[in-house]
Image (cartoon, helix red, strand yellow):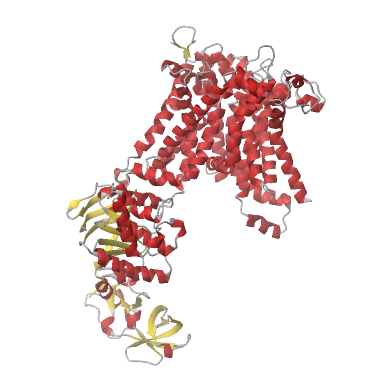
Amino acid sequence: MAAIAFEEVSKRFGTVTVLDRLDLRIEEGEFFTFVGPSGCGKSTTLTLIAGLERPSAGTIRFDGQPVNHLAPRDRDVAMVFQSYALYPHMSVAENIGFPLKLRGTSGRDIETAVAEVAARLGIEALLARRPRELSGGQRQRVALGRALVRRPRVFLLDEPLSNLDARLRLEMRAELKRLHGEYGITTVYVTHDQEEAMALSDRVAVLNAGRIEQCGPPLDVYRDPANLFVAGFVGSPPINVLDARHFRGLAPPADVPASGVVVGLRPADVRVATEARPLALAGDVQLAEPTGDALWVVGRIDGQQIIGRGQLTDAPVPGTTAYFEYEPERLYLFERATGRRVP
Amino acid sequence: MRRAGTYLGVLLVAAYCLAPLAWQLVTSLRPPAELTTLPPLLPTQLTFEHYAAVFAGHPFGRMLLNSFIVAGGATLIALAFGSAAAFALTKMRARGFGLILAIVLATSMFPPIATVSPLYLLINGLGLRDTLAALILTYASFALPLAVWVLTNFLRQLPDELYAAARVDGCTPRQALVRVILPLAGPGLAATGLLVFIVAWNEFLYALTFTATERSRTVPVGIALFPGLHEVPWGEIAAASLIVTLPVFVLVLLFQRRIVEGLTAGAVKG
Amino acid sequence: MSGALRRIGERPAAFLAPAALVLGVVTLFPIVYVLWLSVQHYSLIGDAPAFAGVGNFARLFADARFWNALGNTVYFTLVSVALEVVIGLAFALLLARPFVGRAPMRAVVLLPWAIPTVVAARMWEWMYNGDFGVINYLAGADTNWLGNPYWAIHAAIAMDVWKATPFVALLLLAGRLSIPAELYQAARLDGAGAWRLFRHITWPLLRPLLLIVLIFRTIDAFRVFDAIYVLTGGGPANTTETLSIYAYKVLFQTLEFGYGSALAVAVFVCIAAITAAYVWLLRGSAR
């Protein structure tokens, strides 16, 4: 187990800057997630930790020791890839035992270690099979087994759940959380799925275009987004962004004109009613989308979209007017020009 | 109608490809007296005496062995060096990828006649004339561009994540090549190896120039210089021809798909 | 590229080195060496090399036998490559039709390509035999194919066409089979006949591959050596003497390494020019 520190770490490919002066500390034993849209630099961050790439500038430290020039094999890092990258010519047991074999572990010890990991992952019955004979979920477990078998200092996961169907994804999510609890290994996780990030992590870092927009515990990031990008990326359905003029009695700070701010309002904080309410915006209903336990109502106010939570028993009809009720203390203000949060 | 036409056409193509070989087979089985008489087209009786004569009267067995050693050695070197180079070009970010490939391709266009005189002097200078080593090295170099090109195209299709996984699991680049990449490149290695073997097995100009005696002479040279005291021994030449063709014939029958794959990988993706 | 782009612990140069070494010593160095030889007066049975300047090339330009060999080579190349492409394309289109037994047929078609050229030449030499050859017997003729100044080069061409056409056919067949069948189905629905299918689908989609095949074949035909060495040795009366054969004779029969190397350089230059021309054409068609 190790704490990982990034000090002014940049990564450029030719003229393209993928990571821009990253400064960050991941604590020992933490479950840390990089989340962001594709191309934000999150996977590159993992390859830098793994030692598959070297930073163009800055220093990466494990427990205070710089590791910039250590090859992957000298870092004691394990990684699970998006495609799982199982070795097709090896059996499941050989796949899991491969990292130990490379370290010169004796055959008997490998066998014991493989059996132990396989038992923890519930894949004892698959050990003799080849990867191509496995389902997606089984491959995922084998990839986890191969990573965990040598109890690495750092455990890296690159979009490990993105190739699974929705149900399996939930199951594996719980499994990952459980394994992290059991092994206690510092875990760095990369995903574009903010929900996954929220559910799994001790802390998340929202990355955008090679920079960290915000870093903190998931709930803090959700409740207290630093800017419009984070507010828009974290939370589902995405946050509503509306002109300030729709909100009566809204008081932006004295130095900012009302036209210079926009209002963010989470759909979960909006209640939709079919009758007028005191603190509500009237909008034309476009769509009512039941998701089983909730009903999301999509409306338009002066050409701007708003989503709110309706009642299944009282679904508004598209084409009619509905009232999107909000609580003033749940409004976020952002500078229109920079996206920065206005207190 | 159309289907009958197709089959007729296919038969004609088969006849086109096989007729000269078939005639050679007929010749090799003809009694000596009937070699100089036509008709009959087919011999009245079959004889294997030409085959026996090939091995009895000439160092033909030795030449066959030479050919196997030379073609096999060149194939091994071309595969080993070629796969290492293709690995560096595809899985590591070797500098000047395009330039290196272009140079490699350009060297494959070099006419053998242009390098045969300096190589002759070089080989003589090194005291390697009339040795198998000289031919093995020459053929390996001759075949390397092909090997690098075809293997590069094959290795490019292996996911980069496999290489990354091997590195994280603790492989040095060399271990990743030997334990993960090469076992997965089997079809590519097979296709390349077959092409290289056939090219080396058939080569003539260098073999003619660099060899002097049966110590290193390969079969094509032996057949081209087939000795005849008074007249050309057509029956024995036919028998010898078929014997050299046999290994190639077996390879082609067993691996026609792989060979065509290699050929097209060499050409189409260029 | 900056060093940072290289990954940690990787030294691609070490993996490229063995191949580079072999290619360098056995291919690139000889090319430089042959250029040096070509400007020397140097005979293996004479004195040490002496600088000749452009002397060898001046001699080459005045050498009627060189021009004869060049003419023979060009004629041999043009006629055999043209025939190979036309027949090969016909074979490819035929073999692309559905029929049972494509795999064994592919092996059959590979055979002429795969057997040693020397062996193929010996086979044809026997079939061409003026007295006992099967060709004369079947044709009811009495021609000395390889001894006749008119027929000899055509006999060599026929043998080369026989051996190389399958290579062309197999590559074009692979290209033809990689054209999606939906294209043909859609065109047929639009009422296109066989000729229009060929003209508007097969031909344009095969053309880039055809150019590549042409490069391979042209270069191979231009440096022809084995077939002619065995069939005619360049005779009769030098009517089949190609550049490679002439260069070989000068090098290894008269042992004039200076002038022979100049001839070899001439072959090299011709092939470089052919390659450059094709690459230029290929770039043009890719655009």
Q: Is residue A136 left or right of residue B237?
A: left
Q: Nearer the viewer, residue A167 or A261?
A: A167
Q: Nearer the viewer, residue A70 or A233?
A: A70
**Residue located 56% across and 16% down the image:** C60
Q: Residue furthest right?
A: C140
Q: Quadrant of the N terminus of chain A?
A: bottom left
Tell me which corner region of the image, top left, top right, bottom left or bottom right, holds residue B26.
top right
Q: Is residue B250 left or right of residue B21?
A: left
Depicted A191 relative to depicted C218: above or below:
below
Residue A204 visible in the shown view: no
Residue B100's x, y, as percent? 42, 37
Q: Quadrant of the C terminus of chain A?
A: bottom left
Residue A84's x, y, as percent? 39, 58
**Residue located 36% across and 68% down the image:** A172
Residue A94's x, y, as percent? 37, 52
Residue A147's x, y, as percent? 32, 57
Q: Nearer the viewer, residue A23 or B68?
A: B68
Depicted B83 relative to depicted C58: above or below:
below
